[in-house]
Amino acid sequence: MLGALKRLWHKLGSPRWFFALTSFWVSLFGWAALLFLLVGVVWGLAFAPADYQQGNSFRIMYVHVPAAMLAQSLYIGMGVAGFIGLVWRMKLTDVFIAASLPLGMAVTALALFSGSVWGRPTWGSWWEWDGRTVSTLVLFFLYVGIYALREAIAEMQLRARASALLAMVGTVNIPIIKYSVEWWNTLHQPASFGLTQKPAMPSEMWLPLLVMVLGFYALAGCVVLTRMRAEILHREGSARWVGEWVAGRRGS
Amino acid sequence: MYFDSFTEFLQMGKHGLYVWLAYGSTALVLLWTWLSAQQSLASVTRRVEQQAQLAARNTQLAARNTMSGGAATGSEREQNLAGYDESET
């Protein structure tokens, strides 16, 4: 059992093995994302009942909440990858960080923008210096910071170590985002959705949200794996297995 | 269907602008993340394929040169060098 685990651990560190394995998962996640997002958008926009206080503007929740959740999850993923990379010197963790950055930045910007658009009819303002809004803005700057850091350092090992460290340190911001609605007197509504408690809304309102969250995460799986494959090819371009892979592609 | 007519669906009560702005930006951003990832894999793949072709050509040339027992002709050598330059960029 332990031996098998150890073998798996070593395999996980091998870019070649990862590249061979992920082709299937990219298409699976891609189709799942398309399906979930289409169903979720139609359901959330046209079939879910309007909120008794917010009217139809509450439908923005179906894109705002998944974007914000994914923005934080990806950052946590980068922090964990950074830790593993620093401790066990695994090649793939830096590939993961590089591959997650563009998507993380994009969905954080999306969470901020859709929140702003939702805030206008609900709070009466496009922007509030609210605890959650500001800590999410900090999250965005962390993504931008790691991106800029990577662009600035040419030496690969140093770049990997520096971004791993920044990703790790930045995770202190995640609990701040999470508890901001409890710590500070705030405009942002608390979570109406959690793993442990029953949702504070009827099922015809939260089911589309669940579908949208699944769609966002499936898309993230597809996009991050695709980018990791590109990054692996880029780094291992002269390795023998890449040559064999190219030959196999031309043959098929 | 929650709405009675398509116009009502577009209007979203009085929140049409906000709802459609949020959904439109989401569609654009998600589409961009997917397309840019595909594009980056495609371009790396193309480059790796070119490098593989180049390497194959160079081994062929080298083999031919050894067989003919002499150095490569001038033009062949230039081709070789040009190939290496390409692969470095």
Image (cartoon, coloured by chain):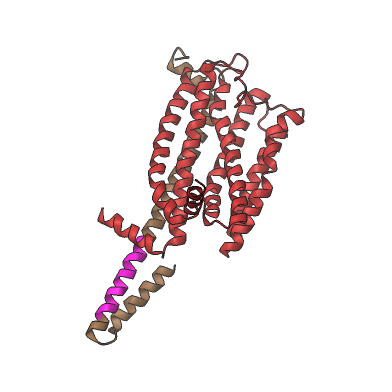
Chain colours: A red, B brown
Residue at (41% x, 57% y) in the render:
B44
Residue at (50% x, 29% y) in the render:
A212
In magenta stretch: residue A131 = no
In this rendering, is residue B73 above or below B39? below
Q: Quadrant of residue A16?
A: bottom left
Could you tell me what secondary structure mostly forms the magenta stretch? helix
Does the image show residue A88?
yes
Q: Quadrant of residue A62?
A: top right
x, y percentage for residue B65?
26, 82
Foreground of the two, A139 or A192: A192
x, y percentage for residue B72?
29, 83
x, y percentage for residue B32?
47, 43
In this rendering, is residue A5 above or below A45? below
Q: Is residue A170 left or right of residue A15?
A: right
Q: Residue furthest top?
A: B4
Foreground of the two, A170 or A38: A170
Instruction: Provide the residue span drawn in magenta.
Output: B49-64
